[in-house]
Image (cartoon, grey):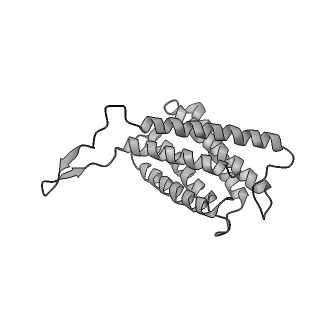
Amino acid sequence: MYGPEPVGWMLVALCGAVGTYCLRRTRGGTPGQRREAAGEAVMGLGMAVMALPASAVDPPPPAVFTALFGAAAVYGLALVLFDGEHRLPHLHHTVGALAMLHMALAMAAAPAHGHHAAPAAHPVPAAAATGALLVYFALYALLAGARLVPAPGSLRLPAAASGARGGPVLRPPRAPEAAAACRLAMGIGMFTMLLTV
């Protein structure tokens, strides 16, 4: 990834942690929930690898990312068309895969020494696609964040259970809330990565 190296390492840590958590979620739930978690794991781990600073690590060739995220976009589109249970999450995963494919193509078109550049033959469509994806992920992150904010008046400490020594033990966040927080983190990460295109 091009851009400030500290930002790249922060994205690697964030997306790697989210991808690993989503990978763990593939072990439970319904088949639809496992497919959803698998799509998020592929996206998170793929984002982590793509965000590796080029100055510190030799990145894989852009063709690897193009093939991976092109296949993910086609698979996501097939799920949107044929999986009636989770169409909306699959649509979001498909948009995410297309965003990663867009970034991989921008990496392939960029000069080897410098910053990302739009492909010389079609700079306006590439810039328009980047702008549309930035708007999508900005809105997605805002809406996902708003859904995690507790309703007014419902702000309470998590329920406490009695520990072995009689003291209160705070319960961890519920799985749906943790999964929603992961989606928010990936939306912010995707927005940040698109800014480097």
In this rendering, the count of numbered labels is: 0
- Is residue 75 in view? no
The residue under the point 80% across, 60% down is: 111
The quadrant of the image that shows the N terminus is bottom right
Q: Going 67% across and 68% down the picture, which residue do you hit?
A: 55
Is there any visible trace of residue 129 in the rendered image?
yes
- Picture coordinates of residue 67, whole percent (x, y): 69, 52
Q: Give the x, y percent position of residue 177.
A: 39, 42
Image side of residue 63 versus residue 184, left or right: right
Q: Measuring from the top left, give residue 36's x and y in whole percent.
A: 50, 42
Q: Residue furthest left?
A: 166
Image point (49%, 38%), residue name: 144
- Looking at this rendering, what residue extends furthest in the top direction? 84
Answer above or below: position of 156 versus 1. above
* Image position of 56 with respect to 7: above or below: below
User: In the depicted view, which residue is nearer to us: 109 or 55?
Assistant: 55
Q: Classify residue 121 as left or right of residue 115.
A: right
Asked if residue 40 lies left or right of residue 3, the reply is left
In the rendered view, would you say 106 is above or below 140? below
Q: Residue furthest right?
A: 121
Tell which of 77 and 117 is nearer to you: 117
Residue visible at 67% across and 58% down in the picture: 3
Q: Nearer the viewer, residue 122 or 42?
A: 122
